[in-house]
């Protein structure tokens, strides 16, 4: 049983480290947000499963299951809301972004023309390539 718990802890730790590396290495807010959300849900999910197996009682299993369910329901929604708000305030996309799908959802202007794309980089900072 302890081998299974150790393996689950290692997998959870791996996702945590992978998320930290993703936050440091990804080029813009949107991809960093994706990396951190995946790490948070999967990493903590594996850690909670390991805790439930280790303590081997119903109370711990129920609490761990509730934590996992809460994270799986709220983390993607929170990431979506943060990304949408960042897009609305025109946080720049990575210059190699292939398709700006949110730009297609923007309402047209009063004169009927399409909304302008977000500025390339309004803060003047450079993005890593």
Image: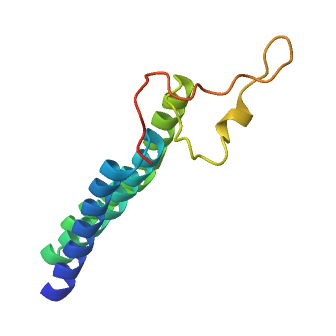
Q: Quadrant of residue 17?
A: bottom left
**Residue drawn at (22%, 67%), measured in percent from left and top?**
13
Comparing 33 with 3, the one in front is: 33
Instruction: Tell me where residue 92 appears, x and y as whole percent.
Output: 51, 32
Instruction: Tell me where residue 34 appears, x and y as whole percent.
Output: 44, 50
**Residue drawn at (20%, 73%), measured in percent from left and top?**
9
Q: Quadrant of residue 101?
A: top right
> Is residue 14 found left or right of 6 in the rendered image?
right
**Residue drawn at (27%, 54%), measured in percent from left and top?**
20
> Is residue 48 found left or right of 93 in the rendered image?
left
Comparing 51 with 43, the one in front is: 43
Q: Image height check: is 8 above or below 79?
A: below
Q: Is residue 1 visible?
A: no
Comparing 82 with 127, the one in front is: 127
**Residue drawn at (35%, 55%), measured in percent from left and top?**
22
Tell me the quarter of the image containing the N terminus. Answer: bottom left
Comparing 51 with 90, the one in front is: 90
The colour scheme used here is: rainbow
Q: Image height check: is 96 above or below 65?
A: above
Q: Quadrant of residue 42?
A: bottom left
Instruction: Tell me where residue 115 appears, x and y as whole percent.
Output: 73, 22
Q: Is residue 72 visible?
A: yes
Q: Image height check: is 24 above or below 6?
A: above
Instruction: Tell me where residue 113 appears, x and y as whole percent.
Output: 83, 19
Q: How many marks?
A: 0
Q: Residue furthest right?
A: 112
């Amino acid at each position: 049983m302890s081998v299974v718990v150790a393996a689950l802890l290692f997998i959870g730790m791996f996702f945590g480290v992978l998320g930290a590396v993703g936050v440091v290495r990804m080029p813009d807010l949107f991809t960093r947000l994706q990396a951190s959300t995946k790490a948070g849900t999967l990493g903590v999910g594996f850690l909670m499963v390991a805790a439930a197996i280790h303590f081997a009682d119903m109370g711990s299993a129920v609490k761990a299951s509730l934590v996992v369910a809460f994270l799986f329901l709220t983390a993607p929604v929170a990431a979506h809301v943060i990304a949408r708000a960042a897009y609305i305030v025109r946080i720049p996309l990575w210059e190699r972004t292939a398709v700006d799908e949110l730009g297609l959802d923007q309402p047209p202007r009063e004169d009927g023309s399409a909304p302008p794309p977000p500025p390339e980089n309004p803060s003047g900072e450079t993005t890593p390539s």
